[in-house]
Amino acid sequence: MQTVTNRLLIAAMVAFAPQLAVSDSLVDIYESALENDPVLRAARASFNADREIKNIRRAALLPQLSASGEYRESETNENSRTTFNIEGQVLSSISEGTIDNNGTSYNVSLSQAIFDMPSWYRFQGGKALSKSARAQFAADQQSLIIRVSDAYFNVLRAFDNMQTRKAEERAIQRQLEQTRERFEVGLLPVTDVHEAQAVYDDAAVNSLEAKGTLNIAFEQLQVLTGQDHNVLAGLAEKFVATNPQPLSNNEWVDFAIGNNYQLKVAELGKDAAYNNAKAAAAARLPKVSGRASYFDSESDGIRFTSPFENQQDGNSFTVSVTMPIWLGGSLDAQRRQAKQQAIASDEGYIATKRNTVQAARSLHQLVLTNTARVKARAQSITSADSALQATQAGYEVGTRNIVDVLVAQRTLYQARRNFANARYDYILSMMRLKEVAGQLSPDDIYQLNASLDPQLVINKAADQ
């Protein structure tokens, strides 16, 4: 007896093991997207590139050390004539021979900017741009959390919608069969059959559309991770929608002004543009630089039949001052251009700040609305179910017709779809509120993952 029981347990474990092995949670999708999402990988590369702007612009203010070296070999064939004048001096002579020359030389120089205001302001702008790159990457990381959440819960939404569409189709089909049976025994007119048939056909089409929507939603997960996902964990029935904390709208606005990453990007971009404008305005100022160098060269060879050798070394120190006077008007044009770009960046920051405040207020209100909507939708299911039972009872005694029953059935299933949608709308609006407020982090993914039920399987291949 014990052996049979053990075999049954093993068989049950084998039957359920594949299903559990391939089931993916929200955390699984998120961690896979962290490694495989091309949008985030591109954002990471852009961050690594843009954070070097500070180092590149700082280089103009730091010492510049360079070295050069040369080795040369040359051979020259010479054929010359010397001429004598009338006083008996040598006017011409002929000399023929080969000149071999070998030599080495090297030079080391060190230069340093002493006074260069444009480079200083460009360096300050570069620091702002590097900080902006970090803020942008943080915003991109939050965007991944939103995209993963959207994709995951859109699958759950599509699955719930498909389930209710299928259940609605089956209920209407049973009602159609009963209507046909009553028509065949003469209890109902043929118009009732036609009406039930029309409603059933519409329900069948809706079921087909819901199945297609589910497949598309699963494909969106593949876009994020590059992998196939066929089974997900569903949202637990015990999930409760609660109001955001703190409850005050103004506190969320303050969070957004102080922490929103896109607002930080706009602010740092404004600072960079301001420093670039100051650099352009300082372009007419004199630039002072110092340069120290050391050189050494050696050469030896044979000139005709006489050997020779030459050696030189030395050092120098130079302080130079340069100041542009007229460059075809380009300096003035660049100054005006940089000033207008700074104005545009400042106005862009103001617009971003206003949009951030508005988004925080509207999303906060949306979360409050969705919280109440979840509770109302749950109650509407109870009301719709009670109304359906009353309508069916009236149909049985002849006080209600088939159209009333079909409408009541569709109302019940619509209420169930509305409840499911309200829960997912609440979750996503809460995530977006935290994103705008700069409060969204991977911890929100892990906390939300705890609200999933691994036993509630969302299967791509489901056809129920």
Image (spheres, rainbow, N blue to C red):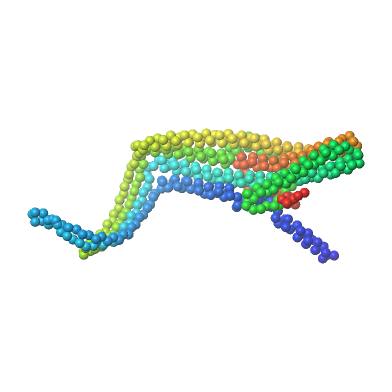
Residue at 76% from the left image edge and 58% from the top image edge: 15
**Along the line of sight, the residue nearer the viewer: 83 or 418:** 83
Q: Is residue 219 left or right of residue 297?
A: right
Q: Position of residue 322 (x, y in %)?
A: 34, 41
Q: Please identify the quadrant where the N terminus is shown.
A: bottom right
Task: Work out whether residue 283 or residue 98 is closer to the camera in this orientation and state it.
Answer: 98
Above or below residue 162? Residue 336 is above
The residue lying at 89 percent from left, 38 percent from top is: 188
Res. 57 visible in picture: yes
Q: Position of residue 159 (x, y in %)?
A: 73, 46
Q: Residue at coordinates 34% horizontally, 37% vertically from top-left? A: 325
- For image coordinates 33% across by 55% down, the residue present is 107
Count of marks, rendered view: 0
Where residue 198 sits in the image (x, y, percent)? 80, 39
Q: In the visual, does 377 lie left or right of 42? A: right
- Seen from the viewer's position, the closer of residues 456 and 439 is 456
Residue 239 visible somewhere in the drawing: no
Percent x, y of residue 390: 86, 37
